[in-house]
Image (cartoon, rainbow, N blue to C red):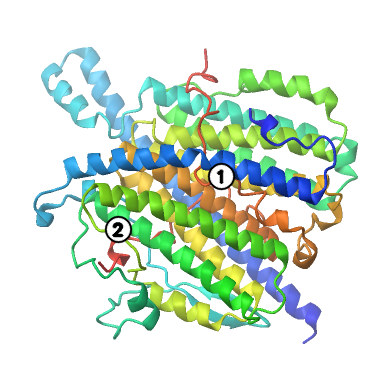
Amino acid sequence: MTADRHPWEMPISESELTSATRDLDEAHRETLPLMFARAHDLSEELTETAPRDPATTSARRVFLMGAGGAVVTFALAACGSRARFVSATDTESPSESGSPSESESATASPSASAGAYTGELKGVALSAALENQAVNAYQSALSAANAGKLGTVPPAVSTFMKTAMGQHADHAKAWNSALQNAGKQPITGIPLTSQQSVAAALGKVTSVDEAARLALKLEDQATQTYLAAVSTATDKRGIDMAASIAPVEAMHAAILNFILGENLVPNAFISTDMAAKPSDLTV
Amino acid sequence: MSRDDVDVRLLKELTEQSQDLNSDAVRITREALERFTEEAAATQRRSRWSRTGVVGVLTGAGTLFGAGRAAASSDDVMALQTAASIENLAVSTYQTAAGLPFIQQGNKTVAEFIAKTTEQHREHAKAFNSAVTQAGGKPQNAADPKYDAVVKKAMPGLKTPADVVKLAISLEDVAAETYTKNVGQVSNAQLRRLFGSVAPVEAQHRAVLLTVQSLLADGKADLIASPTQPDKLPATVGSVGIPDTFYPTKNASPVNEGAVK
């Protein structure tokens, strides 16, 4: 039981609560070295098991294989005064759909080349890219908020965005650590087929509500991608890492649901319908 | 069309979307269990052949082929039974809490959350016990013994909603930590998917409860509402519900803690 981590018996002030929260955050950040160590172990395992011939890569070894559902892309659709996201099957590769968007090309890793990530390392790279996408989305929303483009931003929303963004950055760092230790380039950009539509949606956001709904979709996709990963991966350390991140993304979603006034915990089980697939990775 | 009309339409649409998503999730979990059942049955058939000695050599090959794929180990069965025991305890604890006068007559959103969460834990228990049965084990209908004692000790001291929330946070954390660890412990993909689909839900329960706890501590119970008033929420609400960058497992229950004896 961990009840002693959250003392609350006596009402305390907000400043005291903030301080306590900071302590908690610091305490949990103590787990980071452990996770990076796991990332190092993971990279060693992946290097040892990496197929020498990419053409013979077995599906059994593919980490983070999606559930086989439709690739989810995001589009902002008007729905009265509010906005919602709709999913669509995205069968177009960047080359088929034209030139990459400015945001995509600006954030793609310059050192990454086609086919650079194979086997389970492709799943690791996909994870890093998804985390980068989330960081970028929150950063863009915060920039828009600072520029006054979202109207009045409640302090709780601002705090949430900063906290979630920091956690996503740590997740990306962990996955990239595994890639680097395996001799691969880290994913510093967002080489994902969905990024063009996500960037477009971000550009159209004009309210906190819309920004939160976009973030909710990204959090749900991340959670589901990690669930798909633990179902298909074979490396225990990769499974452990994905398993330890999925609940955190789900918690982000719960807070967003609270802020948005949505069903707080809408589902008894997490699905994988929105999970990203290795083929969503463009490097 | 009045604003009320629009809101009702939106509410209906969102409710339908939510129900669709939940149905999808339940369907996927059921499919995982069905796959597990099929493969467990195949393993049992191989095992029966082995016992009869009719096709001993072939059985050896078959068991080897099935190892680590569908066959549930004794640790798998115990982990599922322990998970069911944690869920059983959560259900009974929330049910008791729901009957307390300060919950019944208190914050409506808290009461609704307790009711919904109870139902979700009941579904989890059912799923875990279904997997236990399909793996050839006995379903666990009792509560986790370690935490049952903790709950029994805490019950007389539940005098306020905050007391209930604190106890619930502990139970949800144990569940989330245990299942997060179980994902890497069980022996086949179907069970990893089952534990992996439940752990984030328990973490979400905890996130909500941590937020409720902070609002209660701050004397802002009126903001525990759906929808809430985001502009009035203290800044801490943005972080207090998401304290972990990586979900910890140091308090995870051992796989045999709630196993059927």
Q: Chain of mark 1?
A: B
Q: In the structure shown, which secondary structural element does the residue marked by tag 1 occupy?
A: loop
Q: Residue at x 23, y 40 (%)?
A: A44
Viewer-closest of B106 and A126? A126
Figure check: A148 above or below A215: below
User: In the visual, does B243 lie left or right of B154?
Assistant: left
**Residue flagged by tag 1: what amino acid is it?**
Asp
Q: Is residue B5 visible?
A: yes
Mark number displayed over residue A149: none
Do callouts 1 and 2 point to residues on the same chain? no
| Quarter placement of the N terminus of chain B | bottom right
Figure check: A269 above or below B227: above
- At which x and y percent is residue A51? 13, 48
**Residue flagged by tag 2: what amino acid is it?**
Pro
User: In the visual, does B105 lie left or right of B17?
Assistant: right
Q: Residue at x 55, y 37 (%)?
A: B176
Q: Which residue is mark 2?
A: A186
- Rounded to the nearest angstrom, the CA distance separating label 1 from label 2 is 24 Å
Q: Which residue is mark 1?
A: B244
Q: In the structure shown, which secondary structural element does the residue marked by tag 2 occupy?
A: loop
Q: Residue at x 36, y 68 (%)?
A: A190
